[in-house]
Amino acid sequence: MIAAGIDLGGTKIEAQVFAPDWSLAARQRWPTPRAYPDLVTAMAKAIRWCETHAADLPIGISAAGLVNPATGLALTSNLPATGKPFPADIAAAAGRKIAWINDCRALTLSEAALGAAKGADPAVGLILGTGVAGGVVTGGKLLPSPAATGGEFGHFPLAAAPIVAHGLPILTCGCGRRGCTETYLSAPGLARIAAHLTGQTHSPEAIVEGRATTLAFAKAWDIWLDLATEFLITLSFTLDPQVIVIGGGLSRTPGLTEDLTRRLTEATLKGFPIPAIRLAEGGDASGARGAALHAHREAAHD
């Protein structure tokens, strides 16, 4: 075995062990505990399961949220770990070193090394789900992030033009700032757009499924595409990626890459190329595989 990765989500912990050719050799899932001490214990258990497959196996953990490099304390929205020295507590409970990586950066690394963006430089990963975030790979490596906030694309300010054109209110984000991109570009954000149009609450799934038959849902999707296009213009003009890989719940929307490609082609500078927009190939494996890749690379530099 070459490495193992553990993807920690709000509802499940998934451990995966990879063979030398990076094919999946073994996997195991456990429910995510709701109490912090139980969560640390469960993560140590997952690490020990990985260790049964090979001694001295590099093990990485991917999780949503941030770890402040100055304090070692976590900031998370879907785990009971905010304000805790989460990675250090897991390492202490497991009695070994672990490699830690944000889940969106893990997806980006996985897709750039082994998935839909293999060979692309630069490559951008973008998760459109409960929130919005991603990462950047160039030269085969993740772009360094000294403050650990690199790839927090969802907290870019919203583009003014579509907000004004559609009369959307500026909302307070979960991070405490106002007007963050993810307040409308995330899956809950799509629901907020529909609620603004209809005065009623609808699930993102219902909006996506009803676009062809319900005028308000079609309009909500059109507004979402306007916002997404301006966001992709910002990414493109800033990073000039060769490929943008999209994951997360909204990535399962039929026709998403075609819609975004068409809109971005229309919006960019006339005659200039745009990045290829592709769906992530790794699915649920991307987070764990990216964590394993990260751990393997860190071990190689030790």
Image (cartoon, helix red, strand yellow):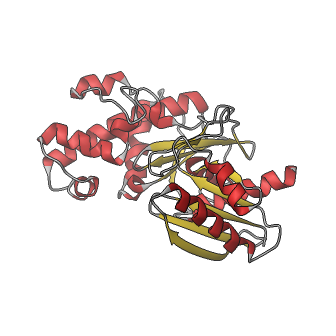
Viewer-closest of 107 and 171:
171
Residue 265 screen position, x and y as percent: 44, 37
Farthest front residue in view: 37
Question: Does residue 23 appear to the left or right of 54 in the view shown?
Answer: left
On the picture, is 167 further left or further right than 251?
left
**Residue drawn where x is 66% and y is 63% of the image:** 5
User: How many circles with numbers are drawn on the protein?
Assistant: 0
Q: Position of residue 225 (x, y in %)?
A: 33, 40
- The residue lying furthest to the left in this view is 199
Q: Relative to 268, is 246 above or below? A: below
Q: Can see residue 75?
A: yes
The quadrant in which residue 23 appears is bottom right
The foreground one among 22 and 43 is: 43
Q: Image quarter for residue 20?
A: bottom right
Would you say 70 lies left or right of 74 here? right
State the residue in front, 271 or 170. Answer: 170
In the picture, residue 264 is in which quadrant?
top left
Residue drawn where x is 78% and y is 73% of the image: 1
Residue at horizontal 33%, vertical 35%?
226
Q: Residue at x 71, y 62 (%)?
A: 94
Residue 45: x %, y % from top left: 63, 69
106 up-or-down from 235: above or below: below
Residue 30: image x %, image y %? 52, 71
Q: Decide if residue 242 is in sight here.
A: no
**Is 172 situated left or right of 206 in this image?**
right
